[in-house]
Image (tube, rainbow, N blue to C red):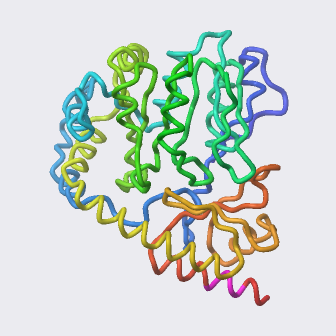
């Protein structure tokens, strides 16, 4: 549980931190039998080679520091993306990569941009560093709506976007990156579930980075392993300011094993995509407005717009989904795609709620 701040803030705390409304992660209950469709975790186990690597890991090695540069893992990631190791940085989850970008590429008088709505951590990271933000409102259907001549020091571009699941076209992303005066961080946390990615932009444009994670498609959210791919100059800047030993030896070993078992990962991706389409059809048949998704979740509006009430009713059915209050998001729910059995139970619960 995140500690509740005291009513009065001691004067020793930075003003930006004292005024900060921290990021609120999805609920992670313990000791309850629930269907968790709220945090975009993969419903299937990690690749088999991860289990093998875990069993083979030499515990005695934990008394030594890990490889500070994650060289072996960076080489595997570079091979995976057709890059070189000096174009890859590994982090403690992709959230660390995002925070490093803000520290490396935004001056105190600079600014950070992102779409609205998008990943709610972006403005929190900006507030921590006490830099201004320049959010860009998406269109009425959450579509791409970048104004001409837009400028900022750094733009966080989640693609597919969260919480909507919409994939912005590479044509639009490229056109924006080519004229944007700052650094563009394309946050591809969900891209393995999508039709296309933008890694080639990060490897060809000097101001573009792509951030990835093993949390979603690789079923390794508990490992906390993310990385960035891009130009050697941008990656070198991030290496300068990362913690010396930011990724544990165990995390490095298990991530390497996962990358040796990509076939199993792709099997799970295919299953999730199929379940996503089936669930979208089921919800559409029940009057829900379903945003087209290229992620492992669906962004939906209940027939009556009563998302908050449905969120609470599903909680009573022991099913967790995600609700985001606010003028743009308050009539929608984000539903993680689980197994076929979990999604069948979810739909059955909707029918019970509708009959009540």
Quadrant placement of the C terminus: bottom right
Q: Quadrant of residue 45?
A: bottom left
| In magenta stretch: residue 259 | no
In percent of the image, x 55 and y 29: which residue is there? 176
Q: Position of residue 130 (x, y in %)?
A: 69, 18
In percent of the image, x 62 and y 67: which residue is there? 320
* 203 left or right, relative to 311: left
| In magenta stretch: residue 349 | yes
Q: Position of residue 149 (x, y in %)?
A: 67, 22
* 211 left or right, relative to 329: left
Total residue callouts: 0
In percent of the image, x 55 and y 56: which residue is there? 39
In percent of the image, x 84 and y 27: which residue is there? 8
Q: Of residues 58 and 320, which is closer to you in this image? A: 320
Q: Is residue 112 above or below residue 108?
A: below
* 229 left or right, relative to 307: left
Q: Is residue 329 above or below residue 108?
A: below
* 218 left or right, relative to 167: left
Q: Of residues 183 and 264, which is closer to you in this image? A: 183
Q: Is residue 120 above or below residue 71?
A: below
Please tell me whether the stretch drawn in magenta is mainly helix, strand or loop: helix
Q: Which residues are magenta?
A: 348-352
Q: Position of residue 261 (x, y in %)?
A: 21, 54
| Residue sticking out furthest to the bottom | 355
């Amino acid at each position: 549980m995140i500690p509740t701040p005291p009513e009065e803030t001691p004067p020793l705390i930075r003003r930006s931190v004292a005024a900060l409304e921290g990021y609120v992660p999805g609920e992670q209950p313990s000791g309850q039998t629930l269907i968790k469709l709220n945090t975009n975790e993969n419903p299937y186990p990690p690749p088999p080679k991860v289990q093998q690597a875990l069993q083979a890991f030499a515990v005695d090695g934990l008394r030594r520091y890990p490889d500070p540069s994650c060289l072996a893992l960076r080489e595997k990631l570079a091979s995976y993306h057709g890059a070189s190791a000096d174009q890859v940085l590994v982090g403690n989850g992709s959230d660390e990569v995002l925070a490093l970008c803000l520290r490396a590429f935004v001056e105190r008088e600079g600014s950070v941009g992102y779409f609205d709505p998008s990943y709610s951590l972006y403005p929190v990271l900006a507030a921590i560093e006490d830099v201004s933000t320049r959010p860009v409102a998406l269109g009425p259907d959450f579509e791409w709506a970048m104004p001409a001549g837009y400028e900022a020091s750094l733009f966080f571009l989640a693609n597919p976007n969260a919480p909507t699941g919409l994939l912005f076209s590479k044509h639009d992303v490229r056109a924006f990156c080519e004229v944007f005066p700052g650094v563009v961080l394309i946050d591809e946390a969900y891209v393995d579930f999508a039709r296309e990615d933008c890694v080639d932009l990060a490897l060809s444009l000097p101001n573009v980075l792509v951030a990835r994670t093993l949390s979603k498609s690789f079923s390794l959210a508990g490992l906390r392993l993310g990385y960035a791919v891009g130009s050697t100059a941008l990656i070198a800047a991030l290496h300068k300011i990362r913690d010396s030993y930011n990724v544990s030896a165990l995390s490095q070993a298990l991530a390497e094993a996962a990358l040796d078992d990509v076939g199993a990962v792709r099997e799970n991706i295919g299953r999730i995509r199929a379940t996503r389409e089936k669930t979208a059809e089921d919800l559409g048949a029940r009057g829900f407005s379903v945003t087209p998704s290229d992620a492992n979740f669906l962004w939906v509006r209940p027939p009556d717009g009563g998302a908050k009430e449905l969120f609470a009713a599903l909680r009573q059915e022991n099913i967790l989904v995600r609700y985001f209050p606010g003028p743009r998001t308050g009539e929608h729910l984000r539903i993680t795609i689980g197994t076929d059995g979990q999604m069948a139970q979810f739909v059955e619960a909707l029918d019970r709620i509708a009959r009540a």
